[in-house]
Amino acid sequence: MKSVLIGAVGSTRVVLQAMIEVGFPVDHVFALDEQFSEGVSGYYPIHKIAEQHGIPYSKFKNINDTKNITVIKNLSADYIFVIGLSQLVGKDIIDCANVGVVGFHPTPLPKMRGRAANVWQVLLGVHKTKCTMFFIDAGVDSGDILDQEEYTIEDSDYAEDVYKKIENAAYVLSKRVLRSIMNGTLSPWKQNEDEATYLLKRTPEDGIIDWDDNIEGIHRLIRAVSKPFPGAFGMYDQKHKIIIWRADIKPNLKYIGLNGQIAEITDEYIDVVCKDGILHITEYDNVDGIKILAGHKLR
C-alpha cells in the first residue's frame, strides 16, 4: 500500500504524526512552501517532520501544477490524503488515487460543508460538534464519510482554543481511520444530502464590529476571528483600525453613552459601552499607532 499526504496547517501535522506513530506507509509529503504561506491561518511547515523521518517531500505553491501531478501520478498511491489545504485539488489529482482521496473537515458532515468552518461554528454558538474524515469527490465536502470524532466548543473559547481542540480530535480520528485502512475494516457511508448545509466564504472585512449588536454577539465575533485569523475590529475616527484580540464582558454600572463609545482607557485595557454591558478589551492592536482618547466612538 502507498499513500501521499498534502497539506499546510496544524491538522496536517497531527495526521502526519499519526501516520508515523501507527506505522502507516506514507511515501511522499507535499508541503506548502513557506514563502507562499502568508495569509494561511495556522500554517505549519510539515516538510520539516517529513525530513526528520526520512520521508520524501516536495514544496509547492499550487498543488495542481503539472510537475506536482506528475510526481503524484508516478507514485501510483492507493490513498492521497489532502488535509488542511485551502486549495481545491483538481480532478487530475483525484484520479491519481487507486482507492480514494481522503479529506478532513472540522464539522459533522453533511452539516456545515464549505468555508471558514472554525469561525462559523463559534459565531453560530455551536457547542457539541464533530470533525470528519471523508473521501473527496467532485462536490463540496460531499464524499462518503470514513469516520467522525466529537469535540466541544465552550463559550469562553477563542479561535486558538478551537484550533487545538480540532487538532486533538483530528489526531484521535486519523489514528482510528488509518488503523481501519491497514486492517481492512474501513466501512465508509454515504452522506444524507437532505441534511446538508453550507457555510459561505468569509473575508477579513467581515470582522468589522457592529456596535449596535448585543454584547454577546460582539464577544462571539472577537473570539471567532481572533488569532490566527485577522481579528475583529472597530474604526477610530472612522479611519484608524483597532483590532481586538481579547475581551471580557462586564456589567455597565456607571457609564451612559453611545454604543461603541470609549468609556475608559488605560495602559492595560479599553472599556467600550455596548447596549447591554461594557466590553472590557484586554488585548488589541492600534494599527496606526494613533492616540486613543476616552469619549471617542468606535465605528
Image (cartoon, helix red, strand yellow):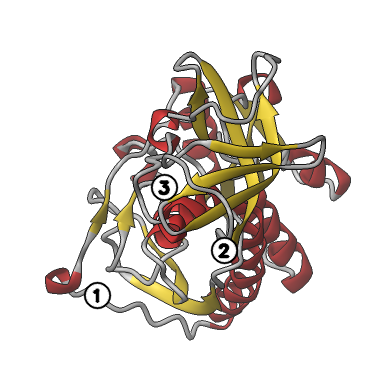
Classify the position of the N terminus by image quarter.
bottom right
Circle nearer the N terminus (2, 1): 1
| Residue 286 image position (x, y, % from top left) | 67, 24
Asked whether the residues under the numbered discs 3 and 2 touch, taking CB atoms below 8 Å apart as contact, a structural biologist would say no
Q: Amino acid at mark 2?
A: Pro
C-alpha span from label 1 to label 3:
23 Å
- In the picture of the structure, the residue carrying the numbered disc 1 is 190
Residue found 67% across the figure and 39% down from its top: 264
Q: Amino acid at mark 3?
A: Ala
**Secondary structure found at label 2:** loop
The residue closer to the viewer here, 187 or 86, is: 86
Q: Is residue 101 visible?
A: no
Q: Amino acid at mark 1?
A: Lys
In this rendering, the count of numbered labels is 3
Whole-percent x, y for residue 70 in the image: 48, 29
Tell me where residue 204 appears, x and y as whole percent.
Answer: 45, 31
Label 3, on which residue?
116
